[in-house]
Image (spheres, helix red, strand yellow):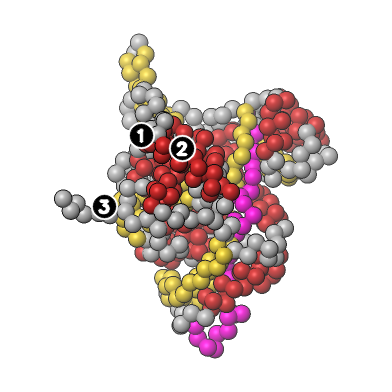
Amino acid sequence: MDGRLLLSVDIGSTYTKAGLFRLEGEELRLLGKAVRPTTVDDLGRGFAEVRAAALAAPGLPPEAPGSAVPVYWSSSARGGLKIAAVGLTPDLTLSVARMAATSAGGKVVRAFSYELTAGDLAELAAAAPDIVLLTGGTDGGNSRVVLHNAARLAETPLPAVVLYAGNRKVRDEVAALLSGRELVTADNVMPEVGRIDIEPARDVIRRAFLGRIAEGKGLAGVAAAAGREPLPTPLAVFELVRAIGERVPGWEDFALIDMGGATTDFYSHGESFRGGEAVILRGLREPKLKRTVEGDLGLRVSAEALFRSESAFFESRLGAASPDLLGLRAHVESVSRATDLLPADDRGRRFDALLAAACVRASSLRHAGTIQRVFTPQGGFEVQRGKDLRRVKALVGSGGYLAGLSGPALLLEACAPDAADPDVRHLVPEAPACYADADSLIPLLGNLAADFPGAAARAAVAGLKPLRPAPNRS
């Protein structure tokens, strides 16, 4: 295996990146990189350009032609796979459905619990998901709600694929109700109360992604040239986060924020519940490895939605009636119209930094669980919901803006508590060391994580840039 060459390519919405690596024993060494704007008219053209540029790097043996170098690749160029989750209760089957969707690289655009209403169906149609993930009931458990929801979906003119991963006992009845729709099935995501089995549904979602991504301009040719199907970029990063947490000592508890123009993805690895004599977990125990994706948190495509959803944050930083708030509003309108626009002055750069801070803070608060103090006649205790991130020792920023950070201040927005409710504390990281994926290697190494998990994980950590506070010059 010594000296084996591997090429990794990631086709993003804005840029297409390639990295040529040499596998030396159990370690990966970067030989060269190439970056080109994504050729949206023909994605294969940009792929060919970065492939040729990366393979021209010094160190490629002349007797090893580029065509012999295996290619691992991922793509997010057509946007994330949009998934609507339909479950029985928010804390159980719906929560598990979200886990299955996000861990497979999908983006949950709507989530519904209990019986679908006419209003729910109108929202579902407006969201135009690629997949409706229908769950509900343990095996042999509740069937009434899932059959009701299947019947309502059968009446709704949606082009989406319906993935049924609920109560096995009524699978045939669900299939009969949805006989006129494109339907696929997987094992129940929660066959017993408290037992989660999302892998079968994850696999179906991944295959659906491959079918959808193949529709992209030129991607069928890329698959033929690479000799393999692509990974969804979020899934590649998910598997790299898993490899780092499992294989790099000292990185068992860490988080990664991947921020782009349209979404902000938050990944965490670590135990979700500390326990304690006076702490009760409400709902499911969340997995050690978790991803959430926020479709209203982005610096360009989603800037308008960000400005609306985080208006209180912007007002707290700028003042509710300040000229700067009006200036930020104008900046948001400009970058939403021209998503490739880069600020030309300090004021514009300050506004971009504020948008980025809002993305980091909001994604952390939404990803993290909460703990609430409750008092009863028998005494007080605490109720935890969701995942505890307080043990996170390292926080990594990835994606265009976060990759370019020079200090930790913006990433540390992830540690800011939400003061909206004094009785509820968000379990955000407390005092993590901060790092930037300065060379944008995370997605490229993510492509290699399935076949070379240890080597990819170590190379990813070694390539991170530590972010330290600027020295005090006073």
Q: Which residue appears at 38% of the width and 52% of the height? A: 346
Disc 1/disc 2 C-alpha distance (Å) = 26 Å
Label 1 amino acid? Pro
Viewer-side label of 1, 2:
2
Within 10 Å of disc 3 (Cα), the crowding (few <14, some 14-19, many 20+) is few
Q: Which residue appears at 46% of the width and 41% of the height? A: 328
Instruction: Decide whether residue 170 is among the magenta residues.
Output: no
Label 3 amino acid? Pro
Task: Using the image, determine if residue 203 lies above or below residue 142.
Answer: below
Q: Nearer the viewer, residue 93 or 292?
A: 292
Relative image position of residue 267 (x, y in whole percent): 46, 48
The residue carrying mark 1 is 417
Q: Nearer the viewer, residue 383 or 172?
A: 383
- Is 219 situated left or right of 303 in this image? right
Q: Which residue appears at 76% of the width and 39% of the height? A: 158
Disc 3/disc 1 C-alpha distance (Å) = 20 Å
The residue carrying mark 3 is 469
Label 2 amino acid? Leu
Q: Nearer the viewer, residue 23 or 441?
A: 441
Relative image position of residue 399 (x, y in whole percent): 47, 55
Q: Circle 2 sits in a helix, a strand or a loop, which is it?
A: helix
Magenta-tinted stretch: 60-88
